[in-house]
Amino acid sequence: MMSAENALHEQRAKPSAFQLTIRPDNIGVITIDVPGDKVNTLKAEFVEQVNDVLIRAQQHTALEGLVIVSGKPDSFIAGADITMIAACTSAKEAETLAKKGQSTLAQIAAFPVPVVAAIHGACLGGGLELALACHGRVCSLDDKTALGLPEVQLGLLPGSGGTQRLPRLVGAAKALDMILTGKHIRARQALRMGLVDDAVPQSILLQTAIERVKQGWKHQRELPWQDRLLNGPLGRNLLFSIVRKKTLAKTHGNYPAAERIIQVVRTGLDHGSASGYEAEARAFGELAMTPQSAALRSLFFASTALKKERGGNAKPHALHRVGILGGGLMGGGIACVTATRGGLPVRIKDINETGINHALKYSWDVLGKRVRSKRMRPAERQKQMMLISGSTDYTGFEQVDIVVEAVFEDLALKQKMVAEVEANCAPHTVFASNTSSLPIGHIAEKAQRPQQVIGLHYFSPVDKMPLVEVIPHAGTSEETIATTVALAHKQGKTAIVVGDSAGFYVNRILAPYINEAARCLLEGEPMESLDKALVDFGFPVGPITLLDEVGIDVGTKIIPVLVEALGPRFAAPAAFDAVLKDGRKGRKNGRGFYLYPSEGQQRQRRKRADTSLYTLLGVTPKAHMLPATVAQRCVMMMLNEAARCLDEGVIRSARDGDIGAVFGIGFPPFLGGPFRYMDELGAEKVVKTLEYLRQQHGEHFAPCERLQRMAQQGERFYPLGS
């Protein structure tokens, strides 16, 4: 075994992530460059390294100040290493971890000469907390520069002083908004709100920071009078009352970190920084041990791992240009993310100029929002728009590496598109179909190169939904899978590879969930009550609203495919045929289960339940079910189907199933996904609940064989402690 002395020697022998250089003008530059990592993340062993570098700096008696800069090309510090939290076995351990971070950054804050952070790229979590501990901050105007405290997205709060320093710097209102949402702040916005002292081109970032040090100590800028009022005793009560009410309305009590953030920030303002730091460390330790944080961290690790995977063993083909077939809502969205996030030239083909213009307008509108919010310059919008072009024929398609087809859900039409692409594109071109229901093997049946045909299922709206399903058929090559996954990654998407079976994965687990909500509606439960029950459970929208958003017509096309392939348990209630026959499609035509205001209706801005639909369905609405009962019926149907999908190989792992459900349909993230949730409940309890519901409501609740076997043998989807 290694002795303690040898272990200490080995730790000291490791190269430090903090390198100090003293310039001739007596300004010290501390460069952070974590060896072997693409980005800087703060680790537990850095406590000693920071202490050492600050001691060495102070040994220079003529030292006038320090600048802290990153040695990485495109990031400052991306946050803290989250694996440190996973290693903690108790709240006390996690609290100690937070206190070490606080103590380390307190050394920077108390340094006897000015310390300025020169920020370029991601400055998030612990990275921003380090910058807040400095006496000044300068950031680059580069689009890659983003500042934020995203810990709430992991069920945590900033644990190294962020909850205390940020409110005093930018005001309690802006600080709470940043910490409770985890939002990223761009350079110009950071400058306006006082988060940084200057924002300059990257080429002069270091020199600007050095000049700021040379100016000596500067008084912290005075907050605007509105922020001073809200930070004061009178305004504080009103502010925290409003924030708490809004937060509860959004979280429904499912995210304990949000409430603790509010408490800790207020403690610091009411009782002083010392009490605030103590409350922050204690809250960090307790939150780190919550099941919500464990679930959210598992999702983070899973999505991070997926982004590094190719989908198989083969290498992807290089991607230089992308073709899109169809300029509708989906085609326009796919073109937008390909050009604006992937930086790839896109060629759109549609049967007429109107479709092409519609697709171009989609990207213009998305980028326009960024311009209006000052997150993008008009010149940059123009540059990105120039990547998108269109044609009513295949001109320019001879150079594309992958074609994404987004035409109507018609098998003959899609097979025709395959033939046309093979005739007009290069021999290596991949054909990816954005179908939501048609088997990929059928689409490839008549292809000359079936190994290059694959499914690539996006979710609407494409620019907002993070998931794509990659669906190879039996004859799809490994190279095609890898190339398609590579495109998804360039588009900023999280990709899961799923089997070519009816409904794929996401729609397959969604259909029984929505069908059960439909049965509850036919039993007389009002649609608003149904939606509220599932929103309170943790979904972003309820099942009835979701069906309106997806499109009732789209849903009715998927259900018959599922019934034909998988049996009557997928059949929607027969009474629902009347809804579609009544011309109701959902939000897209303003009439679904809800009525939606047209653009010209200024007074009626919110959707409202269409009570005439109850007459159409022959039901008398009356809230009579407990919200927990509604949620249990709908969610148990989804869990049961998810387990079947894993058993049948539709998904490759429980991890992929959790990512697909959370990122694809908004399964409550704080539960970690269907499989994490079933592990939390225990397979035995899941089976007992399904058996009870089976007796009460019908055979469609029968637990699948996989769950029954797991219940009998005491098995889990994930290893205990993972």
Image (cartoon, grey):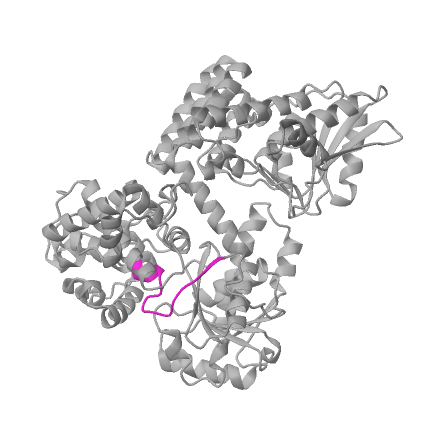
Q: Is residue 444 above or below residue 192?
A: below
**Residue 373, placed above or below residue 708:** above
Which residue, as the protein is rendered here, is positioned at the far right? 24
Q: Residue drawn 74% across and 18% down?
A: 112
Q: Can the viewer see residue 224?
A: no
Across and down, in percent, residue 316 comes to 58, 68
411, above or below 83, in the image: below
Question: Which one is nearer the viewer's eye here, 583 or 63?
Answer: 63
Percent position of residue 123, x then y: 62, 39
Q: How many marks?
A: 0
Q: In the depicted view, which residue is nearer to us: 657 or 584?
A: 657
Q: Decide whether residue 641 is among the magenta residues.
A: no
Q: Nearer the viewer, residue 717 or 699?
A: 717
Report the residue at 50% width, 83% height from top: 449
Tell me the quarter of the image containing the C terminus.
Answer: top left
Image coordinates for residue 302, horizontal then vertical, percent:
47, 49
**Is residue 499 highlighted in magenta?**
yes
User: Which corner quadrant of the image does residue 55 belong to?
Assistant: top right
State which region is magenta.
494-510
Q: Is residue 696 left or right of residue 99?
A: left
Give the image location of residue 554, x and y in percent: 31, 66
Q: Quadrant of the N terminus?
A: top right
Outermost residue, top direction? 271
Q: Nearer the viewer, residue 157 or 582?
A: 157
**227 with respect to 703 (left or right):** right
Q: Quadrant of residue 131?
A: top right
The outermost residue toward the front is: 1
Q: Is residue 80 visible in this depiction of the protein? A: yes
| Residue at point 10%, 51% (across, down) | 695
Residue occupying the point 35% across, 73% down: 438
